[in-house]
Image (spheres, rainbow, N blue to C red):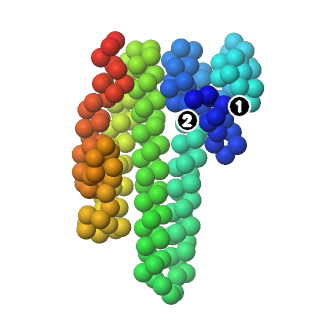
């Protein structure tokens, strides 16, 4: 896949693996920096063209996930505002509210999950202890956020009927998805090939 084929809202979206490799190789001045913050790049203010390979400023994975989380927050805020004025069809309004809250909770989780993956990849490339610690901390936070999100969905959308299932190679109920997430956390060294260091 060519890097130029990945776009997000009109901006080039940097692939996570490529992004992590650049940060691991060139340092934190490229962490969460698409090149537009010249104060972080001490050597060459416009070096993002040489490093990222684009003439325009791409979207970093952190920035992309921050935007996704903000959309989740906005969805919940709108639903909360709407709930204050709902008079008719209260049950349908509650259903919409529950979906918007689920979206917000899942966007919190996904942001943390992607940040954990970035740190895990960076550690895989450079072996820095601080990146390893960040990967473990962020993945633990992601599991906690996932549990909150999935339990909310299980109780308020699925109403513990087991109708909602997730596919992760196999089919899982909401509680089983939490266990799968915990198992993945344990397997991080294998997933990110840390054992080859």
Q: Which mark, by number, is residue 61?
A: 2
Q: CA distance from mark 1 to mark 2?
A: 13 Å
In percent of the image, x 36 and y 41: which residue is there?
Answer: 141
Q: Nearer the viewer, residue 81 or 114?
A: 114
Residue indicated by mark 1: 57
Which quadrant of the figure has residue 56? Answer: top right
Residue 145 position, x and y percent, is 36, 48
Badge 1, how many Cα within 10 Å: few under 14, some, many 20+? some
- Kind of element beneath mark 1: loop
Q: Nearer the viewer, residue 76 or 169?
A: 169
Please say if 75 is above or below 190. Answer: below
- Kind of element beneath mark 2: helix
Residue 96 position, x and y percent, is 47, 71
In percent of the image, x 51 and y 87: which residue is there?
Answer: 87
From where the camera sits, is residue 148 visible?
no
Q: Nearer the viewer, residue 84 or 71?
A: 71
């Amino acid at each position: 896949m060519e890097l130029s084929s990945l776009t997000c809202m009109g901006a080039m979206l940097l692939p996570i693996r490529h992004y992590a490799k650049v940060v691991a190789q060139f340092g934190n001045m490229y962490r969460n920096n698409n090149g537009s913050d010249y104060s972080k790049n001490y050597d060459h203010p416009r070096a993002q063209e040489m490093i990222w390979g684009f003439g325009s400023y791409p979207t970093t994975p952190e920035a992309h996930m921050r935007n996704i989380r903000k959309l989740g927050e906005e969805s919940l805020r709108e639903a909360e505002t709407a709930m204050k004025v709902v008079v008719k069809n209260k049950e349908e309004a509650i259903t919409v509210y529950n979906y918007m809250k689920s979206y917000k909770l899942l966007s919190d989780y996904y942001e943390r999950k992607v940040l954990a993956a970035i740190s895990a990849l960076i550690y895989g490339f450079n072996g820095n202890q601080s990146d390893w610690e960040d990967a473990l901390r962020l993945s633990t936070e992601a599991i906690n956020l996932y549990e909150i999100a999935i339990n909310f969905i299980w109780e308020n959308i699925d109403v513990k009927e087991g109708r909602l299932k997730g596919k992760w190679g196999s089919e899982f109920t909401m509680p089983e998805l939490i266990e799968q997430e915990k198992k993945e956390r344990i397997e991080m060294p294998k997933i990110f090939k840390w054992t080859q260091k």
